[in-house]
Amino acid sequence: MHFFHLYERYKHRINQKLFYTLNQLPFQKSSLLKAMKYSVFSGSKRLRSSLIYSTGDVFKVNITTLDVISTAIEFIHSYSLIHDDLPCMDNDNFRRGKISCHVKYGESTSLLAGDALQSLAFNILSNSFMPNVSNLKRIKMISELSYSIGSSGMCMGQNLDLEAEKKDVNLSELEIINLYKTSFLMRSAVRLVYFSSNNFSKSILSILDLFSISIGLAFQIQDDILDFKKDSVKTDNKKIIKKHTYPLIIGLDESRKKIKQLHKKSFLALNSLKKKISIPTC
């Protein structure tokens, strides 16, 4: 199947699962639920879910299990974006061309919406039916996700990002920020699938880590390029740059080269994986 057809199929499937899950919650008319739904359906690319479904296809993981993992990861991602936009963090009034959650529903409701989505993700991962996933595997998956988004993962990345605003940052430091802020959740999405499968090999897990981290870093740089262009096109012709990014430090051309390098690195990892296991073709 053509990549984009497969991607659209995955995207449609996870959107249905997210919609169904949120509609099962109580207090549907509350501002909290409205804020949660608004953020979850604010135009996400569902890249992490696509990685989950495609990885699950490789390792023959039941589609129901993949639905559970995708739902949990998407809720975590949405929670992180709500908090990321808050005035005490990046203070961004827009997200994907729409007004941010805190602008529409207020700071307090948005803060709670992020908290609620995070707890909902772990509730789903803890209680939802996942065929052939033992309690031991489930605990390992919960441990992996919690580790990747806390002080050893995404939250630390955000903290490093905030601290970087107060000083000069080199490329090595910037890569560490992006690694923790973006790549670790991408890596966790792929790892959860592998942990739910009937396989375990440290060498294969290392290959998957290399692949997902490279994709995550490339994705962050591309996102920074888009933000750079958006911030540069202002009516007063002045560039408005808030954060240290690849485009700001090394320029657009070198940033694009870096993306190509990471893209090549991720495909080399896939080729290495293909030699170890049988990967179905799209």
Image (cartoon, helix red, strand yellow):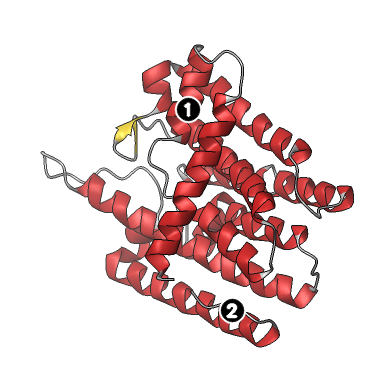
Which label number is shown at residue 37?
A: 1
Q: Which residue is mark 2?
A: 269
Quarter of the image for residue 209 reads bottom right
Label 2 close to label 1 by CB (< 8 Å)? no
What x and y, as percent, mark residue 3? 41, 68
Name the residue rendered at 51%, 12% in the picture: 30
User: For the image shown, how many numbered marks are present on the structure?
Assistant: 2
Which callout, 2 or 1, points at the residue further toward the start of the chain?
A: 1
Which is more toward the observer, 133 or 184?
133
> Which residue type carries mark 2?
Ala
> Which residue type carries mark 1?
Lys
Identify the secondary structure beneath mark 2: helix
Real-space CA distance between mark 2 and mark 1, rounded to the nearest whole angstrom: 36 Å
What x and y, as percent, mark residue 202? 79, 73
Which is more toward the observer, 246 or 61?
61
Residue found farthest to the bottom: 275
Near mark 1 (Cα within 10 A), the count class, few <14, some 14-19 or many ≥20, is: some
Which label number is shown at residue 240?
A: none
Relative placement, left or right, of 132 versus 25 is right
Identify the secondary structure beneath mark 1: helix
Residue found farthest to the right: 136
Name the residue rendered at 58%, 47% in the picture: 157
What x and y, as percent, mark residue 64? 66, 50
Q: Is any atom of residue 80 visible in this view?
A: no
Q: Is any atom of residue 204 visible in this view?
A: yes
